[in-house]
Image (tube, rainbow, N blue to C red):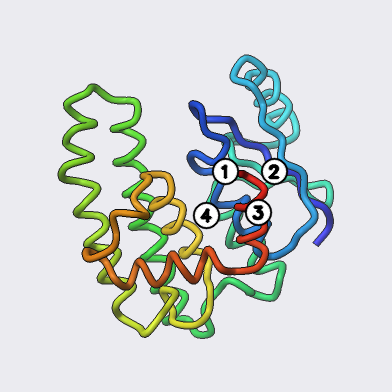
C-alpha cells in the first residue's frame, strides 16, 4: 500500500485511548508506512469541513488518507486495509468471515457501553465497572474458547482481534484476566509478543 495518514483525536490523557488505536495497531502489525496526526478539538471543525468539501458525507474520525483517497469508520477502515493486503486479516471462508463480522459487531457494542460510561454520570460508570465490563470479559472468553487459539480464528490473527485486544487494554483489564478468562490471557500474551506490536509498545514507554 501507499503511505497512509491516520487521523484521530487524543482522548483524555492517553495517546492510545479509543477507536483510532485499533487502526494504529493494525498498521504497526502489518509494517505499513504511515503518519499519525492527532487534531486538537478546536481544529476539528476546519478539518471536518475539509473532509466534507472533499466529498465525505459522514466525516468522522478515525480517518485514513492513502493514494489520494480518504476512508472513514474504524472497522470498515480495517477491513479495507486487510483487503488491500490480500485479505491478510480476514478469514479463509465465507463462514469464517461471517463469524469475524459477528465478533466485530459485538465488540462495537462493548465499545458503546464503555463510551457511555466514560462520558456518563458516576453511577453509570460504577455499573459499567462492576457489571457490564466483567460480563463482556466472560462473553469474549467464550468466543476465544471456541478454537485452540490464541486468536479468535485459531492461529491466524484477524481484524476483530485488534478490536478485542484494545478493549481489554482500554479498560486496563489485562492483569485481571488471570483465573477468570484463561483463553483471553493466552490471546493477550500472543498478541503482545508479535514482533511489530512488541516494538510499538516498547516505543510507548
Point out residue 58 in the picture as x, y percentages from the top left corner: 57, 36
The quadrant in which residue 128 appears is top left
Of callouts 1 and 3, the N-terminal one: 1
SS class, disc 2: strand
Above or below: residue 186 compared with residue 67: below
| Residue position marked by numbered label 1 in the rendering | 20
Which label was assigned to residue 200?
3
**In the visual, does 47 lie left or right of 182?**
right
Q: CA distance from mark 1 to mark 3?
A: 15 Å
The residue pinned by badge 2 equals 6
SS at badge 1: helix
The alpha-carbon separation of the residues under discs 1 and 2 comes to 8 Å
Position of 126 relative to 143 (above/below): above
Q: Earlier in the sequence, mark 4 or mark 1?
A: 1
Q: How many marks?
A: 4
Q: CA distance from mark 4 to mark 1?
A: 10 Å
Work out whether mark 3 precedes mark 2 in sequence or the reverse, and give the earlier one.
Answer: 2
Which residue occupies 71% across, 67% down? 84
Instruction: Looking at the image, tell me whether mark 3 or mark 4 is earlier in sequence order.
Output: 4
Return the x and y of residue 147 as percentages of the image width and height.
35, 83
From the top left corner, tell me how far across and down residue 6 is, in percent. Answer: 69, 43
Amino acid at each position: 500500500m501507499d503511505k497512509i495518514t491516520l487521523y484521530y483525536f487524543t482522548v483524555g490523557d492517553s495517546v492510545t485511548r479509543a477507536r483510532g488505536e485499533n487502526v494504529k495497531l493494525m498498521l504497526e502489525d502489518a509494517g505499513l508506512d504511515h503518519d499519525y496526526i492527532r487534531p486538537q478539538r478546536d481544529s476539528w471543525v476546519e478539518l471536518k469541513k475539509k473532509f466534507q468539501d472533499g466529498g465525505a458525507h459522514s466525516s468522522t474520525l478515525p480517518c485514513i488518507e492513502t493514494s489520494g483517497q480518504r476512508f472513514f469508520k474504524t472497522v470498515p477502515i480495517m477491513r479495507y486495509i486487510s483487503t488491500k493486503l490480500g485479505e491478510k486479516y480476514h478469514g479463509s471462508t465465507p463462514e469464517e468471515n461471517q463469524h469475524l463480522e459477528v465478533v466485530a459487531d459485538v465488540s462495537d457494542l462493548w465499545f458503546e457501553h464503555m463510551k457511555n460510561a466514560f462520558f456518563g454520570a458516576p453511577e453509570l460508570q460504577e455499573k459499567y465497572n462492576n457489571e457490564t465490563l466483567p460480563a463482556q470479559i466472560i462473553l469474549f472468553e467464550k468466543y476465544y474458547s471456541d478454537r485452540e487459539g490464541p486468536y479468535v480464528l485459531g492461529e491466524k490473527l484477524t481484524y476483530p482481534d485488534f478490536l478485542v485486544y484494545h478493549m481489554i487494554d482500554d479498560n486496563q483489564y489485562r492483569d485481571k484476566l488471570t483465573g477468570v478468562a484463561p483463553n483471553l490471557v493466552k490471546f493477550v500474551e500472543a498478541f503482545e509478543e508479535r514482533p511489530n506490536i512488541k516494538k510499538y509498545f516498547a516505543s510507548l514507554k
